[in-house]
Image (cartoon, helix red, strand yellow):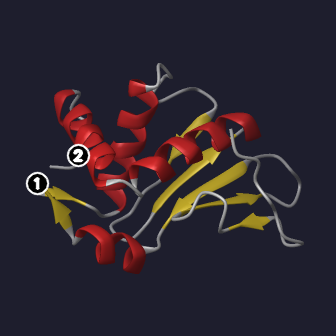
């Protein structure tokens, strides 16, 4: 598993791009953010197989990635808070955030993996409708 490289402000925007990790100043939680739409839409467009690549769509992909990896899609130690223009998730545990960031980064950097996770999201009702 990759190791995040946080800058002096507590952000890592490169290790898991287009996923960003950010440590809360008090260390209470880790923020997980996907909002590099230029990169995502540049690679795949706004949709793939009519699946929207927006905040809610990415949230569904996060759930699908976690489920596919044998993880609880909506674990007690994480909180989803997505909008149309961002997928924002808070984790209480750095290891969980890193594991999820790596899964989602792999998905958003490979079309075949993305298409597979879209199928998982649809099969499990994670797609934004």
The reply to whether discs 2 and 1 touch (Cβ–Cβ < 8 Å) is yes
Residue occupying the far top of the picture: 70
Disc 2: CA contacts within 10 A as few (<14), some (14-19) or many (>=20): some
Residue at x-position 41% and y-position 75%:
39
Along the viewing direction, whichever of 32 and 3 lies nearer the viewer: 3
**Residue 48 position (above or below residue 84):** above
Local secondary structure at mark 1: loop
Relative to residue 17, is residue 56 drawn left or right?
left
Q: In what element is the residue under mark 2? A: helix
- Residue extending furthest toward the left: 50
Of the numbered discs in the image, which one, if any, rests on residue 79? none
Residue 9 in view here? yes
Which residue is at a point 57% across and 47% down the rendered structure image? 101
**Which residue is disc 2 drawn over?**
115
Cα distance in 3D space between marks 2 and 1: 8 Å
| Residue shown at the point (23%, 27%) measured from the top left | 124
Q: From the viewer's perspective, tell me whether residue 83 is left or right of residue 79.
A: left
Q: Earlier in the sequence, mark 2 or mark 1?
A: 1
As drawn, 31 above or below 46: above
Asked if residue 55 is positioned above or below residue 37 in the image, the reply reads above
Q: Nearer the viewer, residue 49 or 124?
A: 49
At label 1, counting other C-alpha atoms closer than 10 Å, the crowd grade (few under 14, some 14-19, many 20 or more) is few
Percent position of residue 56, x then y = 32, 55
Q: Is residue 93 visible?
A: no
Q: Position of residue 68 (x, y in %)?
A: 39, 26
Q: Quadrant of the N terminus?
A: top right
Q: Position of residue 128 (x, y in %)?
A: 22, 49
Residue 26: quarter of image: bottom right
């Amino acid at each position: 598993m990759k190791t995040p490289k946080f800058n002096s402000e507590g952000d890592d925007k490169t290790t898991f791009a287009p996923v960003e990790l950010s440590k809360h100043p008090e260390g209470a939680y880790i923020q997980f953010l996907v909002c590099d739409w230029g990169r995502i839409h540049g690679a795949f467009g706004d949709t793939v197989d009519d699946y929207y690549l927006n905040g809610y769509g990415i949230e569904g992909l996060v759930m699908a990635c976690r489920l596919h990896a044998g993880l609880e899609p909506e674990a007690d130690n994480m909180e989803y808070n997505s909008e149309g223009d961002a997928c924002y998730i808070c984790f209480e545990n750095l290891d969980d955030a890193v594991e999820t960031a790596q899964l989602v980064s792999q998905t958003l950097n490979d079309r075949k993996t993305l298409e597979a996770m879209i199928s998982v999201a649809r099969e499990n009702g994670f797609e934004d409708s």
